[in-house]
Amino acid sequence: MVKELAGVKLCLVVDDSRVVRKVERRILEDLGFEVAEAADGVEALAWVRTAMPDVVLLDWHMPTMSGLEFLRRLRKEPGGATPRVVFCSVESDLDRIREALDEGADEYIMKPFDGDIVASKLALAGVL
Amino acid sequence: MTPQDRELVARLCAERAGLKVDPDKVYLLENRLGPVARREGFGSVHEFICAVRDRDEERLIWAAVEAMSPSESAFFREPQTFDWIVGEVLPELARRREGGALRLWAAACGTGQEVYSLAMALEEAAPAGVTLEVFASDLCERRLEKAQGGIYSQFEVQRGLSARRLVRHFEGLEDGFALSPRVRQMVRWRRVNLLEDLTRLGRFDLVLCRNLMGYLQEEARARVLANLANVLSPDGWLVLGAGETAPRLSGTAERPGFYRRQALARAAA
């Protein structure tokens, strides 16, 4: 339903930390996005089946379903190839970042981050 | 810092490097000069500036001036610029120089992000048929040292650099990321004051000097632009920031910030 707002892009924030989701929401809303939240991969999958977002800001390590597993499943959903997926994780090992890109992530943010980094990465992902 | 200290720094910056420094920006001055004062063993910025004034030592004067030179830097700023350089400008120049060399220079390269962005883009898609020589310079010795090391913090590699380029061109360190020797070795470094005669550096086919002009006094800006124009090859390009202008060179509407000598632009028209 939020996607019905003309011209406003929907970003689904997936992170098990409420504090991180709150920070990301504030940055994304300042950048003009409509924001939805999910606390793990399972919740996020339920979300995308209701309303496919334009972009997903995705944590890696989460309970019940990791970000990487969510990404694999998202890409198999009807319309799931469309959203840009930007990982946002404490994981900074280049092999893991390469793995995320190989699985279909568009960009990658290493925590900690700030508004400039989020804006820079969303621009690189083509959604800003 | 006393008002006299701040006035002295502003005057030295203007005289030595043509830099526009506002003596009322106390925080900026303290922030930039504090680390230099500590490094030089002074108890405060005021003590450091007293030494600059009393000793009249070139090394100390330049330490202060260099610290006040612009330092803002990010990878692939105005990314379209690099697409134009690698996709259009260099292939055209390469056709003209077939079998020869193209000399590229990133003037005022700061801590290296600008010239390494160029080097990465060239490593990915270099124009065929020519040898590329990439030079980089800055006024500040310490920034050049950092640039040559090619090591960047996690924060720095996330400003403008795509994740794909990060994994392609960098290696992870315990604390930061190191640019691959393959890209680092493409660049040759030198400390250059753009106010001085630059012709000893030879001719260049492309000079990148972006986002510096706004930090220069009007007279210095004109001199730097004239000096850079002097080292351009007859068909070479000077690339400024998209919002910067070079009144005595010819710009192109389709590529904001790109300038070349007027005679050539007229001949092409």
Image (spheres, coloured by chain):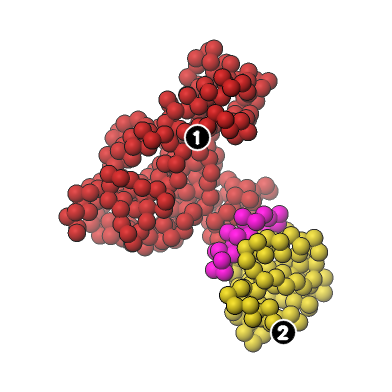
Chain colours: A yellow, B red
Q: Which residue is mark 2?
A: A50
Q: Residue, x 63% and y 47% (percent of image)?
A: B153
Instruction: Using the image, tell me which numbered label, if any, was put on residue B267.
Output: none
Residue B110: % across, % down:
49, 41
Residue B30: % across, % down:
62, 30
Instruction: Please name the amino acid that badge 1 sits on.
Output: Ser
The residue at the far bottom in this view is A78
Q: Chain letter of disc 2?
A: A
Q: Residue, x 40% and y 45% (percent of image)?
A: B209
Which structural element holds mark 2?
helix
- Position of the N terminus of chain B, as image quadrant, is top right
Which structural element holds mark 1?
loop
Magenta stretch: includes residue A27: no
Instruction: Please name the amino acid that badge 2 sits on.
Output: Thr
Horizontal side of A101 relative to A73 (left or right) equals left
Q: Is residue B174 visible?
A: yes
Which stretch is magenta? A110-128
Q: Callout 1 environment at 10 Å: few (<14), some (14 to 19), or many (20+)?
A: many
Q: Which residue is mark 1?
A: B69
Q: Residue, x 37% and y 56% (percent of image)?
A: B256
